[in-house]
Image: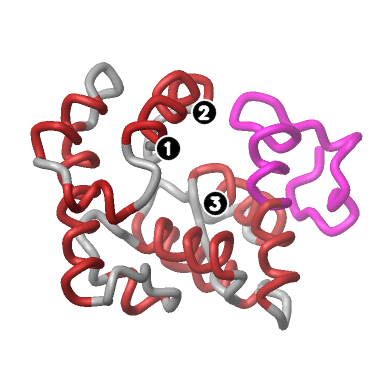
Amino acid sequence: MLQQTQVSRVVEFYGRFLRTFPTLERVAAAPARKVMESWEGLGYYARARNLHTLSRTVRDTHNGELPSDIASLRELPGVGAYTAGAVASFAFERRAALVDTNVARVIARVFAPRLNPKRSRDLSRIWTLAESLLPRTGKATWAHNQALMELGALVCTARIKRCGVCPVSTLCKSVE
């Protein structure tokens, strides 16, 4: 639900969706139309279709268990690099990079201000940087990824750089 949608918009849908579908197994067992109905009003309906297909794939080819490794996650419908990294890191405490808009902005500003996250070749370099910055363990990676996302959402925002309160300003190559 959070793919390309702000948390404030998702909150009202999330609880209702989980009450209807408390497990991936329940999503898989439901007709696609029911999953779509429960998503109604949230938009980006391909995500609901992908979630339904994903749940059936997990049921049928992974014995009902969501895989924890990035390669297997990437094979699931609707799962790209960011989602695979987020699931591996946050759900399974795996050592996995994730780069969303906020993380890309932070990494570019701090380490490579000449990179533009909107250019695909530069975004690829940002992913490489993100992977090189990962802590050694999955548990530490969980906190690291959370911190990068929060830093980009609250301190190093698209509109305002709050360099005076940034915990990494002494390392930053774009401090004003």
**Mark 3: which amino acid?**
Ala
Dot 1 alpha-carbon crowd within 10 angstroms: few under 14, some 14 to 19, many 20 or more: few
Q: Which mark is residue 104?
A: 3
Residue at 49% over, 44% down:
101
Please say if the residues under marks 1 and 2 sit with CB atoms less than 8 Å apart.
yes
Q: Is residue 148 above or below residue 64?
A: above
The reply to whether callout 3 and callout 2 are in contact (CB within 8 Å) is: no
N-terminal-most mark, 1 or 2:
1
| Part of the protein shown in magenta | 147-176
Q: Position of residue 90 (x, y in %)?
A: 58, 60
For residue 110, what is the image quadrant? bottom right
Helix, strand or loop for the magenta stretch, by majority = loop
Give yes or no for residue 44 being in the magenta stretch. Answer: no
Q: Is residue 158 magenta?
A: yes
User: What is the quadrant of the C terminus in the image?
Assistant: top right
**Which amino acid, mark 1?**
Leu
**Crowding at mark 3 (Cα within 10 Å: few <14, some 14-19, many 20+):** many
Residue at numbered disc 1 = 2
| Residue at (50% x, 59% y) in the render | 86
Q: CA distance from mark 1 to mark 2?
A: 7 Å
